[in-house]
Image: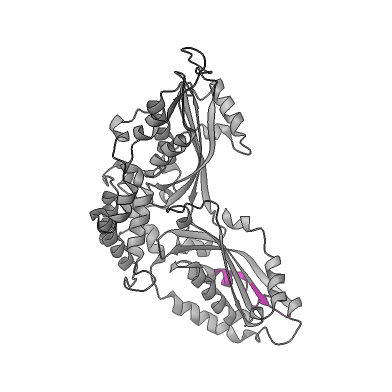
Amino acid sequence: MGALDEGHYHAEIDNEVSFELGFESQPETLAIQDAVRVLLQGLGEDINREGIKKTPFRVAKALRQGTRGYKQKVNDIVHGALFPEAGLEGGSGQAGGVGGLVIVRDLDLFSYCESCLLPFQVKCHVGYVPSGKRVVGLSKLSRVADIFAKRLQSPQRLADEVCTALQHGIKPTGVAVVLQCMHIHFPNFESAFLDSTSQGWVKITATSGSGVFEDGNADVWTDFWSLLKFRGISIENAHRRYSGQSWCPSQSCGMPGQANSAMTNAVNSILKSLGEDPLREELVETPFRFVKWFMNFRNSNLEMKLNGFVRSRIDTRSPSGHGGNFNDGICSELNLSFWSQCEHHLLPFQGVVHVGYHSSDGVNPVGRPLVQSVVHFYGFKLQVQERVTRQIAETVSSFLGEDIIVVVEANHTCMISRGIEKFGSNTATFAVLGRFSTDPIARAKFLQSLPDSCSARR
């Protein structure tokens, strides 16, 4: 693990009150807003449209809050939280003078991926062996980890920086950091239509150790893993060192043939406004990768083609409300994969869609692929979940009949990568048409048939 520049830890801490009060007029905020407007126009969006009029400001606020670690320093956090604790006089080693290994587990963090600028989730476990008859306040371990998470990162560098900062700050016998990271794997528009089973998340475990943890095979690591009680995780893989190139899904997508120079320049402007150097080796290709991903959501004329296809199918069957026992004829297409982009914060949300309809003969007249295509069509736009739920319901009613119920379950990145940081939350919305809107028994029957919502989270 390479030593880090000591000055890396000594930037000023922002005053939270002044950050909020002066935020709108700060040059960095204005520059990010201008850049976001360029990106939206590159998608063909009307930047004065009601739904996205305030998006540039919301994006600027989320990005600056999510990268506030650049303006914080470790020493102010740690040095005021070192406490004396009686133990072995001058002791050093496993006991460390105060009683042995200390671990804080399951710290939920998020960080922005330096390769693609999308947020990734982190489950952080930090341990240290105290020395010099001193212990550090436990909450400070979490705060130090958060400082480095709130920067553009890769999992391995994040683990190394947290480890090095704690080693320098509290001077223990050793520090161990284990990060379980999850990065959303967002397919492009074409591949989503070709393969609807695309993996939702990329997961890796990154580790870093100093002092007595420098040797990955040391006995103290055995104690550490035992106290973490990992289940179903390969410790051998956990000891591998990962780089950004080997984990971010955008690395496997290749480079765009011709990137929009105005849009890539806008991303470079965002990087500078966050306090980063766009010429840093790990960031040189980031604007191109971000623009390639972002262009998945550009406006297109595909709606005309889709509507034409749907219209040709409308008359292939009678409306489902006619004839048959409604309650006994409920059919469904469950766990349709779903991907979209929040138009308020330009952050992805992902999950599954369930569609219920009435069929007297129990047969889907058009097949599951068309229903999945409708989901993808409305998903690959700047959206809000409430709207996309309604749009899917209205469109599938043209070929599945007028009695429709649609449930969308999704994880929103904006719920973890802004001030609220609500890890593990999941949003469900549903729309009903025809008899599903007036028949509570039919609605209940369909809703009770849905699979465990946890399936929408992975």
Tell whether 101 sits left or right of 167: right
Q: Which residues are magenta?
A: 356-373
For the point 51% across and 70% down, the residue is 386
**Residue situated in front as seen by the camera: 137 or 457:** 137
Q: Is 63 on the left-hand or right-hand side of 273? A: right
Q: Is residue 20 above or below residue 245?
A: below
Q: Quadrant of the N terminus?
A: top left
The location of residue 345, given as percent across then percent down, is: 40, 61
Q: Is residue 30 magenta?
A: no
Q: Is residue 293 above or below residue 88?
A: below
Q: Is residue 370 magenta?
A: yes
- Depth check: 217 or 261 in front? 217
| Residue 165 in sight | no
Colour scheme in the image?
one colour
Of all residues, the one furthest to the left in this rendering is 27
Q: How many marks?
A: 0
- Residue 358 vertical position relative to residue 17 in the rendered view, above or below: below
Residue under the image location 38 percent in, 55 percent down: 62
Q: Is residue 54 above or below residue 182?
A: below
Among the 4 quarters of the image, the one containing residue 266 = bottom left
**Percent coordinates x, y for residue 172 in the rendering:** 44, 23
Residue found at x 38% / y 31%: 80
Q: Residue at x 33, y 73 (%)?
A: 46
| Residue 335 in which image quadrant | bottom right
Residue 195's x, y, as percent? 54, 60
Say whether residue 237 is visible. Answer: yes
* Horizontal side of residue 110 vs 442, given as left or right: left
